[in-house]
Image (spheres, rainbow, N blue to C red):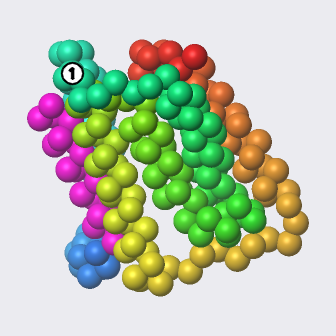
Amino acid sequence: MAMMLFGLVVFLGIHVVTSLRGLRAALIARLGESGYKGFYALLATSGLLLTAYGYALWRAAGPEQLWYPPLGLRHLTLLLMLVSTIAIVAAYVPSHIRSTLKHPMLVGVKVWALAHLLANGDAASMTLFLAVLAWAVYDRISMKRRAVPPPAPPRGYGGDVLAVGGGLLLYVVLAFVFHPYVIGVPVM
């Protein structure tokens, strides 16, 4: 449990630094742009690995069940994950989806966290997904306060086709490769 919590503090903490513009600017001034990016990448990667390993250890120790999700919520999770993967891909593709969602990566992360909260009732999962959901909500509010402009919509719909197609591909890879072989929990 402690390792996952420490990993979350490191991973989410470095992401919060991005929203604290004064601190971010001071770090860039002190470390330089590449030094800051390297520091950021090192902490984000370390935090992610610590979180994943700590989560696996906590679950392997026989996590306490806080509630037992009904089967129907697992089906809803599959649908929500499709929305999440399309939003995540849309963050990298100029599209109407991207401009409508304004910050599609955060939408994808929030939907991912909510979907996993619905499908899992153990303490490790609830802690992980609630923490990530809370950070994503905080970051969206932070972006709104900083008036980060949403991307302008493109002229055609090729980006939308690419976002949906890429989202479907990501969904298939996560559901049929990553989840069963890396997480150890088959989705279907």
In this view, 151 is above or below 87: below
Residue 88 appears at what percent x and percent y?
Answer: 58, 50
Left or right: 4, with 141 as reference point:
left
Magenta segment range? 1-19
Give the residue displayed 40% in from the left and 82% down from the top.
145
In this view, 94 is above or below 188: below
| On-image quarter of the N terminus | top left
Left or right: 153, with 104 as reference point:
right
Residue 53 appears at what percent x and percent y?
Answer: 26, 27
Count of marks placed on residues? 1
- Magenta span has 169? no
Residue 141 appears at what percent x and percent y?
Answer: 39, 72
Q: Tag 1's secondary structure?
A: loop
Q: What amino acid is labelled 1 in the image?
A: Pro
- The residue wearing badge 1 is 63
Query: Could one spot residue 177 in this view of the protein?
Result: no
Give the residue displayed 18% in from the left and 16% down from the top.
61
Q: Nearer the viewer, residue 84 or 122?
A: 122
Left or right: 111, with 14 as reference point:
right
Q: Nearer the viewer, residue 119 or 34?
A: 119
